[in-house]
Image (tube, rainbow, N blue to C red):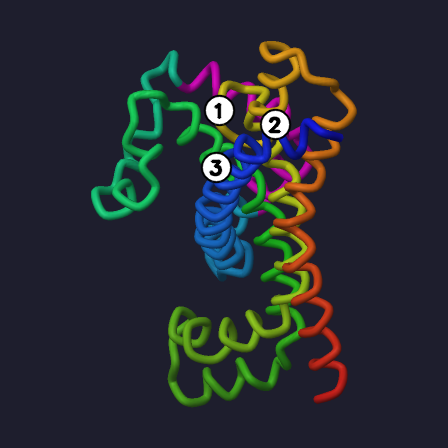
Amino acid sequence: MSVLVEHYDVFLSGLWVTLQISLLSAIGALIIGTIVAVMRISPIPPLRWFGTMYVTLFRNAPLTVIMFFTAFALPVIGVTGNFLKIPGLSSIFVRLGTDLPYFRLAIIALSVYTAAFVCEAIRSGVNAVSPGQSEAGRSLGLTFAQNLRYVVLPQAWKAAIVPLGSVIIAMIKNSALAGIFGVTGDLTSEGQRMISALGQSAVPTFIGIAAGFLVLTMPLGYLLDRLEKQRAVTR
């Protein structure tokens, strides 16, 4: 287990990059998933159809295939995720502004994949809102969009917070695939480099990788347990 002590700086560096990927992907997934959830409950049939097709496609497609397509097919048609080079954001997350696109492409893949599960979590929260709430909003003359914004979604978010947390935990673990598809510096790729280039033992190296992911996921899981217990008490 000396590899964990001797190369702790490598694991910390990989943990930091994985945290960046997870945080940016979570933001993207929450934004896209909320939009798709609104489409799924929209009174406009084409929007409902698009939302349903999106969830059906990405919820049932393997993440490996989506990662492969994003990493190798999108650059062929000129998509490298340059729209993520937002000046203020790329100054905080420096890798967004680099000429190596795989960091941005990994975020795109994780965001669009996880958004399907975020959509269903939010939709379950919407279904938990009493129909009388929406009817009261309509009786006050609120439009569909206003009803969603001021009445339904604020309550739906509260009901969906625990399922959403579970989705984000799964996304953090899924980010391990990013290193396989060319993202350098994350936990998985750093572990692979230590095994292949530095000749370190595979077992302790992967134990270190697993420990890094536990550092990211266990506090979130604990927080979700606390929130669930608080909700059970207040009911």
For label 3, the SS is: helix
Residue 188 badge: 2
The quarter of the picture where residue 174 lies is top right
Whether residue 183 is visible to the viewer of this picture, yes or no, is yes
Q: In this rendering, would 94 be left or right of 35?
A: left
Residue 17 badge: 3
* Mark 1, residue position: 183
Task: Measure the C-alpha gap from mark 2 to mark 1.
Answer: 9 Å
Establish if 71 lies above or below 57. above
Extreme left residue here?
87
Start and end of the magenta stretch?
Answer: 52-74
Which residue: 28% across, 32% down? Answer: 97
Which-is-in-front pick, marks 3 and 1? 3
Give yes or no for residue 56 being in the magenta stretch: yes
Establish if 78 lies above or below 42. above
Amino acid at the residue labelled 3: Val
